[in-house]
Image (cartoon, rainbow, N blue to C red):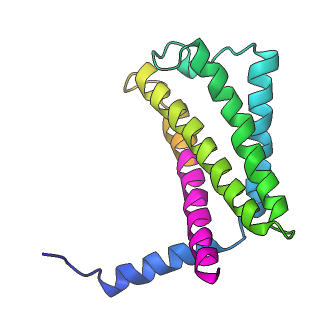
Amino acid sequence: MIRRIPPVSRSLIKRFFVAVDSEGVALFQWLFYVLFIMVGVYGLVIANSQPPLSVKYAGPMAAMNITLWYWLHIAGPGTCLIGKLLTRTKSAYAGMWLQLGGDLGLALALAAYNTATYHSESWGRGMYGAFPLGTATFLSVVILTVRDVRRMRVVERLK
């Protein structure tokens, strides 16, 4: 039996997507993504592909994975920011695809961080990097990815 969504819930969902679809997060997205690129460059160049302490002893984040993980911090946000610039030109459609791909790349990097952090830190100690920082940042990027998908659907309908 399929239940209908109550009107109150529908209203909340609608308001959530109105907020997601707004451009009110653009400044913060630029700030975070430039910082993620800096983390990637720092990790590759200065830290010599050494993992952060919170995931240093995690099995899933081996040396090769750490290098790829840092590259995702550069490629994902960089691709998304280039896509944001392209949306202001005649190549807006290609820019939207770049934004979607970049957001997905960063979401994967953050999911890997969360997985490694949960794997390496036991319950009851040191979960600050996993819950408020890692998970909140991951969910923020997922919301940006949902926004990209919703925009692509609108553009596809207009074509």
Residue appearing at x 20%, y 78% in the figure: 3
Q: Image quadrant of residue 23? A: bottom right
Question: Could you tell me residue 19's position as x and y percent?
Answer: 60, 73
- Magenta stretch: residue 158 in it? yes
Residue appearing at x 51%, y 43% in the figure: 135
Q: Image quadrant of residue 25? A: bottom right
Residue appearing at x 70%, y 35% in the figure: 73
Horizontal side of 139 relative to 4 (left or right) equals right
Q: In front: 155, or 73?
A: 155
Instruction: Give the quadrant of the C terminus.
Output: bottom right
Question: From the viewer's perspective, is residue 143 above or below residue 33?
Answer: below
- Provide the residue span drawn in magenta: 137-159
- Magenta stretch: residue 143 in it? yes
Q: Main secondary structure of the magenta part?
A: helix
Question: Could you tell me residue 8's position as x and y percent?
Answer: 36, 84
Q: In front: 94, or 84?
A: 94
Q: What residue occupies the far bottom of the structure in this picture?
A: 7
Question: From the viewer's perspective, is residue 48 above or below residue 131?
Answer: above
Instruction: Give the quadrant of the N terminus.
Output: bottom left
Question: From the viewer's perspective, is residue 124 above or below residue 50?
Answer: below
Horizontal side of 21 relative to 98 (left or right) equals left
Residue appearing at x 45%, y 15% in the figure: 59
Question: Could you tell me residue 123's position as x and y percent?
Answer: 37, 26
Q: Image quadrant of residue 39? A: top right
Q: What residue occupies the far left of the structure in this picture?
A: 1
- Residue 32 visible at all: no
